[in-house]
Image (cartoon, helix red, strand yellow):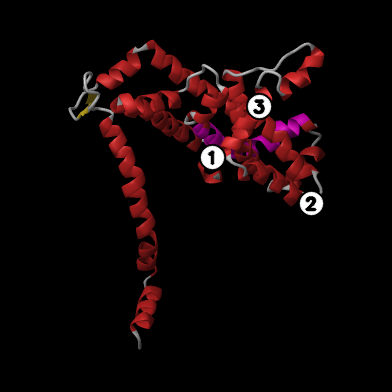
Amino acid sequence: MTLPTRTAGALHRRPRLRLALLLTAPLLWLAVLYLGSLAVLFVSAFWTTDSFTSEVVKVWSTDNFHELFTTPVYRQVVLRSVGVALAVTVLCAVIAFPVAFYTARVARPRLRPLLVVAILTPLWASYLVKVYAWRLILSEGGLADWLLKPFGLSGPGFGLPATVLALTYLWLPYMILPIHTALEQLPDNLLDASADLGARAGRTFRSVVLPMVLPSVAAGSVFTFSLSLGDYITVQIVGGKTQLIGNLVYANIELNLPMAAALATVPVVVIVLYLLAMRRTGALSSL
């Protein structure tokens, strides 16, 4: 019996060993590159920078976090970033639900796969192409101005509303897909039972549909919230003078690396807290 045959037989008789060998490489990759980089990030956040040479001084200090929590500008940027992420998440949920309801429950079965592909199509385009397209739409004399001009209005231009609008477009498919899946798996007999008991459409939605779809909405919000909170390119292109926390991290990388690391810990902590909150809704099991 050859060595490969004996090895295959031994692994077949030991499923736990086989599973351990399969998971070793990805777990090492996760531990060394991902968790290792986070550990370096947290440690470097407690270093300081020489004010004269701008070189990193590897001396333990909490000055960066003290400045982060006591400087009004930093607090405003953090609150603005969280507010933008929440606004994008709410808008995505409001827009995604009727779209997903149509693709999952109203459209003909033959059209549903095509509609799902159409929803996924924007994800195949380049991130920068989509953001610059929104820059052209929102610019002065652009498509937004052209459409609103007959009503005596003008486009939002560049700023915070433009940032929220562009981010909503970018991450909307991540909210539609989990809701579509949940609505597609919703048993028809529950809707029929609700109708037989005399419930109207609104009552059926509140008592039957929403409780079963809510975990999927929360699952989609994990993507929209985290991606919006960490984004800094969109706000640079369509945000005008608006600053989010990602822009501050990028601006401090060259001048004050420890301060940039301290700023970068804020979205990490916020996202972890958000994930813990979403875990209670069953959202993580819907991912």
Q: Which of marks 2 and 3 is nearer the N terminus?
A: 2
The image quadrant where one finds the C terminus is top right
Disc 1 residue crowd, few under 14, some 14–19, many 20+, Cα 10 Å:
many
Q: In this rendering, which labeled residue sits more in front, label 1 or label 3?
A: 3
Give the amino acid type for the residue marked by disc 1 in the picture.
Ala
Query: Can residue 217 be seen at all in this image of the molecule?
Result: no
Give the amino acid type for the residue marked by disc 3 in the picture.
Leu
Which span is picked out in magenta? 202-227
Tell me: residue 155, above or below residue 91. Answer: above
The image quadrant where one finds the N terminus is bottom left
> Within the image, what quadrant is residue 40 found in?
top left
Give the amino acid type for the residue marked by disc 2 in the picture.
Pro
Marks 1 and 3, Cα distance to the nearest angstrom?
Answer: 36 Å
Q: Which residue lies furthest to the bottom in this view?
A: 1
Q: In this view, does 193 lie to the left or right of 237?
A: right
Q: Is residue 44 left or right of residue 263?
A: left
Disc 2 element: loop
Disc 3 element: helix
Q: Is the magenta stretch mostly helix, strand or loop?
A: helix
Disc 1 element: loop
Q: Residue 109 carries which label?
A: 2
> Within the image, what quadrant is residue 245 found in?
top left
Q: Circle 1 is placed at which residue position?
A: 283
- Residue at image position (73%, 34%) is 98
Q: Residue 34 carries which label?
A: none
Magenta residue check for 102: no
Disc 3 residue crowd, few under 14, some 14–19, many 20+, Cα 10 Å:
some
Q: At which x and y percent is residue 234?
A: 54, 28
Q: Circle 3 is placed at which residue position?
A: 136
Marks 1 and 2, Cα distance to the nearest angstrom?
Answer: 27 Å
- Residue at image position (80%, 53%) is 110
- Residue at image position (79%, 50%) is 111
